[in-house]
Image (tube, rainbow, N blue to C red):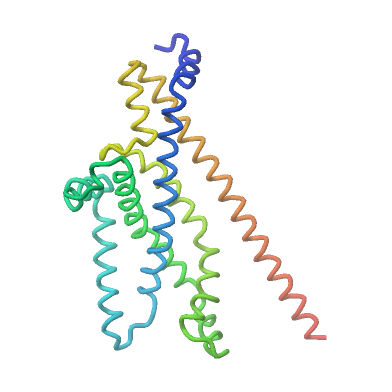
Amino acid sequence: MWDNFFEKFGTVITKYHMQLLSGLGNTLIIALSAFLIGVLLGTLIAVIKVVPKYNNWFLKILDRICDVYVTIVRGTPIVVQLLLMYFGLLAQSALTHSTGGTLFIAILVFGLNSAAYQSEFIRGSLLSIDKGQMEAGRALGMSYSATMMRVVIPQAAKNVVPTMGNELITLLKDTSVAGYITVIDVTFAVQRIVARNYMALVDYMILAVIYLVIVLIVTVILKLIEKRLRKSENNVIVRKGLFSKRGAK
């Protein structure tokens, strides 16, 4: 089974590199697009959850809708959501009959799934910001929305970066089920290769290496971003300290 393993490893990559690259491209497109959808929609949901409702019935209805949405998405497997969208909700649409259409469905499903999780991450981060920040902004004459956009959300974004990074890594690996609706991602491409050369061990080892390399690259990028954010925050603290000392003099 392990005879000439590395030779076979190189042969498979050389012979099927185009299929692997094409599948990898679709995997990255799905993951990155879904992540972006998740950030935008998740932020919107989180803001709806944390803003004061008072007697605003419209916001209360939106809040309930968001609760139901998050509960359903987090309570069902991503594979079920994918199959339900493809064979159920969009079964009669033209999207299910084209390669680009199935790719769009995958992006949509993974994006909606990611948004439910990211909304909770972002909501927790928003709630972790001292209420005095909002009060200070309002005291300076800024509206609630302006204070939220310019003061609260930027601070919350720094706190949520590590968690969002983990969500991106999870998305990259979860896309391996996109083949259930015939999307040719890197996993589906490798399954096709296995059906041709019958070298499952070599082929799936290549697949594992591909995912591992992608995750390592994303991890390095995230660490650089976190380092940059910490450095920026430290500079702000130093400047505030110097300003306070000068004021004391």
**For the point 25% across and 73% down, which residue is it?**
64
Quadrant housing the N terminus: top left
In the image shown, does 54 or 61 lie closer to the viewer? 61
Q: Is residue 42 above or below residue 111?
A: below
Percent position of residue 189, x then y: 36, 30
Q: Is residue 68 above or below residue 222?
A: below
Q: Is residue 190 above or below residue 199?
A: below
Q: Quadrant of residue 61?
A: bottom left
Residue farthest top in this picture: 3
Q: How many marks?
A: 0
Percent position of residue 155, x then y: 55, 70
Residue farthest right in this picture: 249
- Is 95 displayed left or right of 223 in the figure? left
**For the point 47% across and 56% down, which residue is it?**
163
Percent position of residue 141, x then y: 55, 90
**For the point 44% across and 38% down, which residue is it?**
25
- Is 75 displayed left or right of 43 in the figure? left
Q: Quadrant of residue 75?
A: bottom left
- Is 104 displayed left or right of 230 in the figure? left
Quadrant housing the C terminus: bottom right
Percent position of residue 68, x then y: 24, 66
**For the point 39% across and 25% down, which residue is it?**
204
